[in-house]
Amino acid sequence: MTLHYRVIIVAMGKQAGGQGVTREKVVLDLSPEGSATAETVWAISLAEDRYRLDNVPIWAYGLAYCDIVETELGSDGRRHFRSVLHKSGLLTVRAAGPEADRAVFEELCNMLQRNAVAMQRYSASYIACAMEPEKFAQLEPDVNRAEAAGNIFVEIANEE
C-alpha cells in the first residue's frame, strides 16, 4: 500500500484544498506521566464521529497516520479521541537526539524522511514519521548504527 501525503494549511473546520474535505483538530489526551496533557492532530471527517488522522502523532502512543478513529464532542467543544476503529498499518517511528551530533541526527532524519509516507518535525532534535513496516525493516540496520553512534533514540510508538 502506497500513500501520498500533502500538507494543506487550513482553518479549523474549513474545507481543505477546495476538495470538499473537512479537516478538524482532534484532541489526544495523554497520560499524566508526560509533560504535556494533550496533543492535537489534524483529522479528516468521514462521518459524524469518525475521522482519519491526517498527520503523524508526535507524543501519543498507539496511533498512526491514516488510522480511522472514533471521537466524541467534549465539554470544551472540541473533538476528543475515543478509540481506534481501523489501523492504517503504518508505523509511527520517532527519533530524538537532543544531545546527538547534529550531522549524524540530520543524516538519520533525512534517511527516514526519504522513506516515510509522512513526517512531523517537533524541533531540531525530535521527529515523528509514518512508515510502512517493510520500509522500516529495510532501514533498521542503518537506524541501529545511528543509535550506536551515540545520543540518538528511535522508537516505534504504535507497536502492540
Image (tube, rainbow, N blue to C red):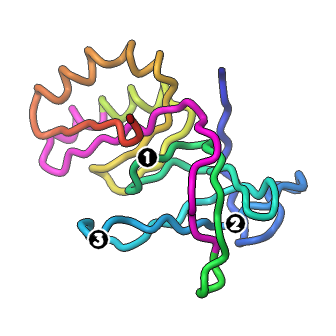
Q: Earlier in the sequence, mark 3 or mark 1?
A: 3
Q: Is residue 123 above or below residue 56?
A: below
Q: Which residue is mark 1?
A: 62
Taking the spot 49% from the left edge, 42% from the top edge, the residue there is: 119
Q: Amino acid at mark 1?
A: Gly
Disc nearer the start of the sequence (2/1): 2
Marks 3 and 1 sit apart, C-alpha to C-alpha, by 16 Å
**Residue 149, horizontal then vertical, whole percent:** 11, 27
Q: Are marks 3 and 1 in contact (CB under 8 Å)?
A: no
Question: Which range is magenta?
Answer: 79-106
Q: Which mark is residue 32?
A: 3
Give the residue type that dot 3 points to.
Pro
Q: Residues within 10 Å of mark 1 (few under 14, many from 20)?
A: some
| Image quarter (top left, top right, bottom left or bottom right) of the N terminus | top right
Q: Which residue is at a point 44% across and 39% down the rendered structure image?
A: 92
For the C terminus, the quadrant is top left
110 relative to 12 in the view: left or right: left
Whole-percent x, y for residue 134 in the image: 47, 16
Q: Are marks 3 and 2 in contact (CB under 8 Å)?
A: no
Dot label at residue 24: 2
Q: Amino acid at mark 2?
A: Glu
Along the line of sight, which residue is nearer the eye, 120 or 155?
A: 155
